[in-house]
Image (cartoon, helix red, strand yellow):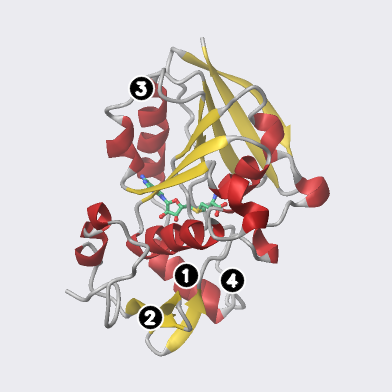
Amino acid sequence: MKCLVLDKYPPFLPLENYSLLSSVPDSDFYLREIDGIWRLFFAEQELLHLDFASAFYRARGGLEYLPKAFKNCERIFDATAGFGRDSWLLAYRGKNILLCERNPYLATLLLQAKFLSERQEKILAVARRIEIIFADSREYLSSKTAADFDAIYLDPMYPEKKKNAAVKKEMQILHRLLEMPDLAEQERLFFAATESGVEKIVVKRPNYACELSAKIPENYRLNHTVNAVNTRYVVYMRN
Ligand SMILES: C[S@@+](CC[C@H](N)C(=O)[O-])C[C@H]1O[C@@H](n2cnc3c(N)ncnc32)[C@H](O)[C@@H]1O
């Protein structure tokens, strides 16, 4: 078993997240601190760190279709946090978001990004609207009810269009970090969301892919879709 971090314990990691350190699979990924910032490495190659103040997270101009899908929702559970880019946009638009990420490296980098953003006056108010947990969303949702959130957001890894040899090496490494999408498991996550009884579930899909599940539980209906350029947000409402 390898360790998530080299050398020392990240100061922004709450002690209750200590399990992050021991939950990593055997791999060449690790986090290393350089100039006070923890960064994801693969072997000797630095891949990324997350910084909510960077351009990557800034409001996306005309491409802000996502907030439209969450009209009238105040408390959102993002079950597939990833880089937190979608959640940051929603928080920027005034929503309160709980981000859940099961990948220990990404969860740690998200915790660091929140820690750092809380020290920047300009984005402090947005940072305060997000919380991050390291967990499997299916497990987490099993103890939740309709009263806990106004909406649940799902953005699972897309099925690959076709093998693309030209995909950049960094992207290939990230794909390896996040594992190949398991469609049956993604469908189980959708069902876990419906079992919570939450009023609204929004699923992000690429335009070339079909719905996450062909089966919609009886207590939900596909209400509408918000169409963006290459993706669509499929909005399910509780009956
Ligand atoms: C496509 S990325 C999400 C990108 C994200 N919407 C963003 O804006 O950065 C999917 C993420 O969901 C996480 N994930 C998938 N299933 C999960 C589960 N059951 N619980 C927690 N995280 C999960 C993966 O580890 C991955 O980081």
**In the rendered image of this protein, does residue 71 appear above or below residue 170?**
above
Residue 32: mark: 2
Q: Can you identify the residue that label 4 sits on?
A: 164
**Residue at 34% across / 52% down in the picture?**
102
Q: Can you identify the residue that label 1 sits on?
A: 174
Question: Disc 4 on helix, strand or loop?
Answer: loop
Provide residue 209's location: percent of width, then percent of height: 59, 44
Inspect this view and state whether residue 211 appears: no
Q: Residues within 10 Å of mark 2 (few under 14, many from 20)?
A: some
Judged from this view, the residue extending furthest toward the right is: 62
Q: Residues within 10 Å of mark 4 (few under 14, many from 20)?
A: few
Which numbered disc, 4 or 2, marks the residue closer to the eye? 2
**In the rendered image of this protein, does residue 159 appear above or below residue 92?**
below
Q: Are marks 4 and 1 in contact (CB under 8 Å)?
A: no
Disc 1 residue lies near ligand 1 with CB under 8 A: no
Q: Can you identify the residue that label 3 sits on?
A: 195
Question: Disc 1 on helix, strand or loop?
Answer: helix
What's the amino acid at mark 2?
Arg
What's the amino acid at mark 1?
Leu
**Residue at 75% across / 43% down in the picture?**
64
- Mark 4 or mark 2: which comes first in sequence? 2
> Label 2 to label 3, Cα distance in Å?
39 Å
Provide residue 9's location: percent of width, then percent of height: 28, 72
What's the amino acid at mark 4?
Asn
- Mark 1 or mark 2: which comes first in sequence? 2
Provide residue 51's location: percent of width, then percent of height: 57, 65
